[in-house]
Amino acid sequence: MADGGGVSDRDGGNDRDGGNDRDDGADGGEETTRPPGVPATPRTRARSAALWGLVGGFAFLVLAQGYLLLDGDLPFGYAGLFALAGAIAVASGGIAYATEHRLHAKRRT
């Protein structure tokens, strides 16, 4: 075989360094657990928090738009609506940044 002995990534979970990614105990030993995904660097945590902030801000705008369609009256104008959406985006992004590493440590992500 010209590709190095026929070893590929589809050989049952074995990676190139000889380790086993599977947690089924197929090697006869105890099951080992590896954290899912890549480690959370500050850059990836900040990007994830920014995206969650956008989700929070846009979700508020969608809810406000739905309220405007149904009832048609808010106690403030569109400038206040976008300012409040920005504040919600910053708050939800900050909360996401502060708590994401804890959720990842508890394996709930």
Image (cartoon, grey):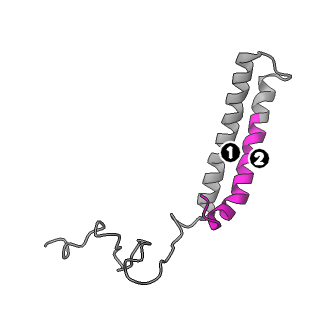
Q: Which image quarter is the C terminus in? A: bottom right
Residue lying furthest bottom: 29
Amino acid type of the residue tagged 1 in the rendering: Gly
Q: Nearer the viewer, residue 30 or 103?
A: 30
Amino acid type of the residue tagged 2 in the rendering: Ala
Q: Residue at x 86, y 22 (%)?
A: 75
Residue 24, position in %: x, y? 42, 72
Please say if 50 is above or below 99: above
Q: Residue at x 47, y 82 (%)?
A: 30
Q: Nearer the viewer, residue 70 or 95?
A: 70
Q: Residue at x 51, y 72 (%)?
A: 34
Q: Nearer the viewer, residue 63 or 87?
A: 63
Name the side, left or right, on which 65 lies relative to 15. right
Q: Which mark is residue 53?
A: 1
Neighbourhood count class around disc 2 (C-alpha, 10 Å): few under 14, some 14–19, many 20 upward: some
Residue 54 among those drawn in magenta: no
Please say if 47 is above or below 102: above
Neighbourhood count class around disc 1 (C-alpha, 10 Å): few under 14, some 14–19, many 20 upward: many
Q: Which mark is residue 91?
A: 2
Please say if 23 is above or below 60: below
Do callouts 2 and 1 mark residues in contact (Cβ within 8 Å)? yes
Separation of marks 2 and 1 at Cα, in angstroms: 7 Å
Q: Which residues are magenta?
A: 85-109
Q: Under tag 2, what secondary structure?
A: helix
* Main SS of residues in magenta: helix
Name the side, left or right, on which 70 lies relative to 104. right
